[in-house]
Amino acid sequence: FADDTTVIGLIRDGDESAYRQEVKELAVWCSHNNLELNKLKTVEMIVDFRRNPPALSSLTIMDSTVATVEKFKFLGCFISQDLKWVTHIDSIVKKAQQRLYFLRQLKKFNLPQELLRQFYSAVIESVLCTSITVWFGSATKSDIRRLQRTVRTAERIIGAPLPTLQELYTSRVRKRAQKITLDPSHPSHPLFELLPFGRRYRAPNIRTTRRMN
């Protein structure tokens, strides 16, 4: 099977032909390379912020109609058609809260503080930070507070301060940016342009509030 495969299409002026041709060619390529598309798990999500978006005809693959959804899970992240992260954050908060139970149980058994911190880092923080460089910068303040409450609960259980999610996000973004600047083959490498003095990078030109967020 072809796992975690996506096709992104841009439809201009209502012309869907290029997008549908791309999907058709993907299905043919998979067939020629002994890969099978699971049509039951294949979905289509339409992102359109116009006030009155026109209805699009159903997408078909090998004579099977593809379901249209408002959100789907991709590489561990829930992506919604409004490009907000509420569904994804709901999911990780729920998962992290469930794992706090095990941290409390370990505390009852009088485990050393360092072992509790290690457990938190491996089992709870890892959940909160999954793909954090993708979504945290666009999360709402209320969602960030919900996430941080989980961290504060863990701090009370362990009895020691823990890194905030903002600190973890900033650290990981810097590491990711450094890797991109050192890799000319990365698709985002051209976005990092040094200013004439050579010490700071030029800020990207942002025209809409949606892109800024």
Image (cartoon, grey):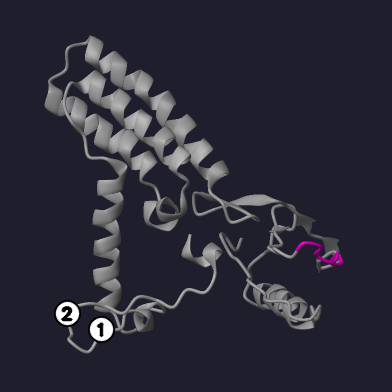
Position in image of residue 15 (x %, y %): 80, 81
Residue shown at 81% from the left, 66% from the top: 59
Answer with the quarter of the image where residue 164 lies: top left
Labels 1 and 2 touching (C-beta < 8 A): yes
The verdict on residue 46 being magenta is no
Q: Give the labeled residue for mark 1.
A: 194
Q: Is residue 114 above or below residue 208?
A: above
Q: Amino acid at mark 2?
A: Arg
Name, please, the residue furthest toward the top: 108
Specify whether 156 is left or right of 141: left
Q: Who is closer to the viewer here, 134 or 21?
A: 134
Position in image of residue 169 (x %, y %): 31, 51
Q: Residues within 10 Å of mark 2 (few under 14, many from 20)?
A: few
Q: Main secondary structure of the magenta part?
A: loop
Position in image of residue 76 (x %, y %): 49, 49
Q: Give the labeled residue for mark 2.
A: 199
Q: Who is closer to the viewer here, 151 or 21?
A: 151
Q: Is residue 79 above or below residue 177?
A: above
The verdict on residue 56 being magenta is yes
Specify whether 150 is left or right of 174: right
- What is the span of residues highlighted in magenta in the rendered image? 51-57
Residue shown at 16% from the left, 17% from the top: 111
Secondary structure of the residue carrying numbered label 2: loop
Residue 202: give its label: none
Answer with the quarter of the image where residue 134 lies: bottom left
